[in-house]
Image: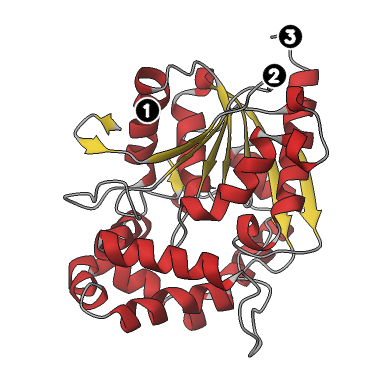
Amino acid sequence: MPVGQRIVHAVIIRSDKGLRPPIVLAHGWPGSFVEFLEVGEQLAHPERFGGLAKDGANVIIPSLPGCCLSSAPAYPIGPREIAADWILLMRETLNVDKFFIHGSDWGAAVASWLAATSPNLLYGIHLTSAIMQPDLNLELRLSSAEEDFLKHRASRGPSDSGYRIIQGTKPLTLSYALTDSPAGLAAWLLEKYQSWGVSRGTDKSPTIDLHKILTILSLYWFSGPGPSTWIYSSLVDGTGLTFPEGTRVNVPTAICSFKHDISPPSPADWQKRCYKVVRRSAIDEGGHFPGLDAPNALVRDLLNFIDDVMGSSSI
């Protein structure tokens, strides 16, 4: 679908008789729309899974720029710019006035920017982590829990920051390597599925279905995988995951943490700096890609959040 100067690919799963508001599912890197196909089917067609058709919703699963079927950016693009594209997608292309959005990884950042800049479009956002942070240069008075969280988060850096630095500083150089060798691309992506999920820290293979992994790898390969990494430039320059002073998400927010996720859960004090958190939940399964390794738990938590918000809404 043309959106401004870019093409935004989106899978749309329409509900036959659903009464719930539309739901957007936003993936990250190295994810794709495939990550949420099973989740989308359950949300759109609960009658096929033992539920009622009236509890369904239209589901939209956009692809991030350069990830699979959305057009690759001509220059590094961050989650704030992607959110602006998706606003046009929802308003002008799909004629959707208001919706819920779930986001994981970079999808959580896009959802957060969308909520911060266009809160009137959203009933609420459901995230696997409170990915946005305040500007730490403002000399904030942090609680002891926040200081411990930041130390724990920083400890991850030495062993798992190489890919972020390369993708954020030399994305074009990396692009040539990833588009030259399918084996190299597979190694670059599959390591994340192994180390960020249920098999994290072990020699076990990813618990995700092999056919789904091969589908994702094929989509990255055939679409040209290099530009998908350019979003990391916004991480390195500090604009992608940091809200400037005075920016905050003021729509209802749910934070749903999965047990084996590589991202450490943040304390409530930290979450409240950037989000209006109305629901927190800890899921005793799944990892960084819950749409693939814990889809049922993800659906349950997302629907509980939606029903809570709509039940307390005057709309």
Query: With respect to residue 304, does 214 lie above or below?
Result: below
Residue drawn 52% across the image and 17% down it = 120
Q: Measured along the vertical axis of the image, is residue 26 above or below residue 204?
A: above
**Depth check: 229 or 58 in front?**
58
Q: Quadrant of the N terminus?
A: top left
User: What is the number of callouts on the image?
Assistant: 3
- Type of the residue with mark 2: Leu
- Secondary structure beneath disc 1? helix
Does the residue at mark 2 contact the one at mark 1 (Cβ under 8 Å)? no
First-in-chain label (2 vs 3): 2
Task: Identify which amino acid the numbered label 3 is placed on.
Answer: Ser
- Which label sits on residue 33? none
Q: Residue at x 51, y 30 (%)?
A: 115
Q: Amino acid at mark 1?
A: Leu
Q: Which residue in the structure is indicated by mark 2?
A: 19
The residue to which callout 1 is attached is 89
Secondary structure beneath dot 3 equals loop
The residue mark sitting in front, 1 or 3, is 1
Residue 314 — which label? 3
Q: Quadrant of the C terminus?
A: top right
Q: Earlier in the sequence, mark 1 or mark 3?
A: 1
Residue 228 position in % (x across, y down): 31, 59
